[in-house]
Amino acid sequence: MTALLQSWANGDRAALDRLIPAVYAQLRQVARSAARRERPENTLQATGLVHEAFIKLSQQRSSRWSNRYEFFSWAARVMRQILVDHARARQAQKRGGGAEHDSLDDESLSLQTTLKAPTSPWMELLALDEALNRLKALDAQQARVVELRFFGELGVEETAQCLGISTATVKREWATARAWLLRELKTTGGVI
């Protein structure tokens, strides 16, 4: 994959055609996990999320990634933005509707709490996005760790390699960021 990314960066547009099949399955797995966090009636399914990410990928003039970790970091950021944009659109359609609560809990990443509030999953995603933006202003590295682990579903080692930090630092930043986000979401009425 690194060779394909580098070929594409050097102007080989055909490398993109070879890159897509190489990463499709892994991005689809990440997207499936993101789709599980949504309601069953959600119109943005895993396939649609991956395809929107690939549309953004194809619009890049050349890659700016030198390895797979940088690529998946970008993919996590893009999928987060697609989900947030979709949530904003859905929330705009549902303004005033009393949607049932459905949490964005992600057991595999332990970003969960027992907070309960009458809100929609779209509002939760928007609250998480806003909280992540506030965290980024305080500590950009912690925000990147959350983005990579939660939205990109990268493991501790992959996150460390992507950010160029130790696995111990990832674990510490992840624990601190989770605690801060849970406190922030509780304070602002967001639900995770």
Image (cartoon, rainbow, N blue to C red):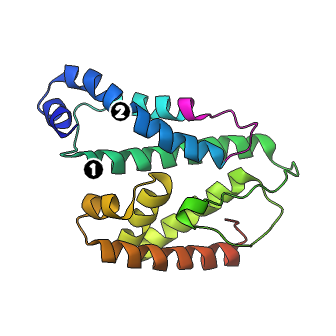
Left or right of residue 49, residue 155 in this image? left
Looking at the rendered structure, the kind of residue marked 1 is Glu
- State which quarter of the image contains the C terminus: bottom right
Left or right of residue 1, residue 146 in this image? right
Left or right of residue 150, residue 63 in this image? left
Do labels 2 and 1 touch, CB within 8 Å?
no
Q: Main secondary structure of the magenta part?
A: loop
Residues under labels 2 and 1: Cα distance?
A: 13 Å
Q: Where's residue 76, x and y in %?
A: 42, 49
Magenta stretch encompasses residue 36: no
Residue at point 69%, 76% (across, down): 186
- Compare marks 2 and 1 and give the one earlier in the sequence: 2
Please give the residue where the numbered disc 2 appears in the rendered image.
57
Q: Can residue 139 be seen from the camera position used here?
A: no
Q: Where's residue 162, x and y in %?
A: 28, 58
- State which quarter of the image contains the N terminus: top left
Q: Can residue 112 be seen from the camera position used here?
A: yes
Within 10 angstroms of label 2, few (less than 14), some, or many (20 or more) residues? some
Give the vertical position of 109 relative to 45 (above or below). Answer: below
Q: How many marks?
A: 2
Residue at point 32%, 76% (across, down): 169
Instruction: Work out which residue is located at the far left of the displayed protein and give it.
Output: 10
Give the vertical position of 50 relative to 85 (above or below). Answer: above
Nearer to me, 147 or 30: 30
| Residue 43 figure quarter | top right
Residue at point 42%, 28% (across, down): 55
Q: Where does the magenta region start and end?
A: 38-48
Indicate which disc residue 70 carries: 1
Looking at the rendered structure, the kind of residue marked 2 is Leu
Magenta stretch encompasses residue 44: yes
